[in-house]
Image (tube, grey):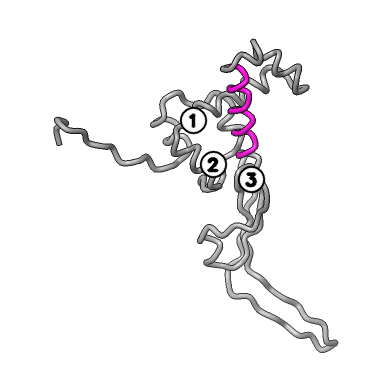
Amino acid sequence: MNRPTLTVAGQASEVVASDGSVVLNVPITLRQRSGRRVVAIGGSRCESGERTRSGATPLQLALARGHRWLRMIEVGEVSSLREIAQRDGADHSYVAKHLNLTLLAPDIVAAILEDALPDGVRLSALLINPPVLWEDQRVALGTTPAPPRLRKGDRK
C-alpha cells in the first residue's frame, strides 16, 4: 500500500483580507525520513537535505540497540537472545530483528547515522530479512554503491 504524499508547489504568499486577517500560503512537502513523517518547508530547499529534527531518529536508535545487544553477546554478558529479551522486556524475535541491523553495509550504516537514506526507507525493511550481500542491500534500498577499488595487479 502506498502512503499518501502531499506536495504543494509554488512561492510563499500572503493574502490580507478586507477584515484585516492574514492568510499565509507556504509550499510544503511531506517526506518519510527514517521511519517518520516530516514536513519540509521551502520549495527547492526541501531537496537540499536541511533537517529540523532534534535527537536520534528511530532508525538510529534501532541501530544502536542492535549493536549494544550484539556487544552484550560478544563479551559474554548474556548467553542468548532470550536473555536479552527478558532483561529488556522485549520478545526474542524483536531482539533478533534488531541484530540484523549489525549486518548492514558500512555505507548504509553511515547513511543511517547521517539521516541520509533515500525517502521511503522504512525500519521494517531493514529489520526483517535484509539481503545478506552488501550489494543486494544497496540495490534493495536504492542507494548508490561505492566505486570498486582497484588493487595492484588487478586488470582494468
Instruction: Report helix, strand or loop for mark 1.
Output: loop
User: Amino acid under label 3?
Assistant: Arg
Q: Quadrant of residue 99?
A: top right
Disc 3/disc 2 C-alpha distance (Å): 21 Å
Contact check, label 1 and label 2, Cβ < 8 Å = yes
Residue that appears at 61% across and 53% down: 31
Question: Disc 3 marks which residue?
Answer: 3
Which residue lies at the image location 61% right of the left edge and 33% below the top edge?
64
Q: Which residue is mark 2?
A: 112
28 or 55, which is in the foreground? 55
Q: Position of residue 23 (x, y in %)?
A: 75, 77
Quadrant the N terminus occupies: top right
Structural crowding at the residue carrying mark 2, measured as other residues with C-alpha within 10 Å and reported as few (<14), some (14–19) or many (≥20)? some
**Sequence order check, earlier mark of 3 and 2:** 3
Nearest the camera: 4 or 76?
76
Q: Is residue 52 left or right of residue 113?
A: right
Numbered label attached to residue 67: none
Expressed as whole percent of the image width and height from the top left, the position of residue 134 reads 41, 30
Going by the picture, which residue comes out furthest to the bottom? 18
